[in-house]
Amino acid sequence: MSELGLGILVAIVLMVALWVPYLVKEIRRGKATLGPRTPVGTGDAHPGRRGDPAPGQPDAQADPYEPRTMR
């Protein structure tokens, strides 16, 4: 084995020795959440409308600009 091959082998062994503990720790830790958490309920893309409320929600509030409600 030449000196160049031995040098490459030593570099690879050192790289693996340093990376493996770090990668094992990161994989066990899992995905990190960045920034503040999203408040509950903001993920409703289709929140429903009057007469057709969103699933699991009470009936929607009456429209304040409807002629029947403006007295």
Image: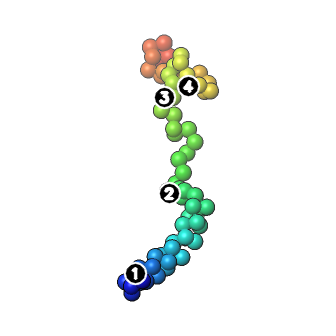
User: Taking 18 as reference, is 32 above or below it?
Assistant: above
**Residue at image x 39%, y 85%?**
2
Is residue 5 rendered to the left or right of residue 19? left
Which residue is under mark 3? 46
Residue assigned mark 2: 34
Q: Amino acid at mark 4?
A: Ala
- Residue name at image x 53 percent, y 18 percent: 52
Residue at image x 52%, y 39%?
42
Q: Nearer the viewer, mark 4 or mark 2?
A: 2
| x and y, in percent, of residue 54 in the image | 55, 25
Q: Name the mark on residue 5.
A: 1
Q: Identify the secondary structure beneath mark 3.
A: loop
Tell which of 19 and 32 is nearer to you. Answer: 19
- Give the labeled residue for mark 4: 54
Q: Are marks 1 and 3 in contact (CB under 8 Å)?
A: no
Q: Nearer the viewer, residue 39 or 14?
A: 14
- Disc 1/disc 3 C-alpha distance (Å): 62 Å
Q: Amino acid at mark 2?
A: Leu
Mark 1 or 2: in front is 1
Q: Residue at x 55, y 70 (%)?
A: 20
Q: Distance of mark 1 from mark 2, alpha carbons?
A: 43 Å
Q: Quadrant for the N terminus, please.
A: bottom left
Q: Residues within 10 Å of mark 3 (few under 14, many from 20)?
A: few
State the scheme by which the image is colored: rainbow
* Residue depth check, mark 2 versus mark 3: number of the one nearer the observer: 2
Q: Earlier in the sequence, mark 1 or mark 3?
A: 1
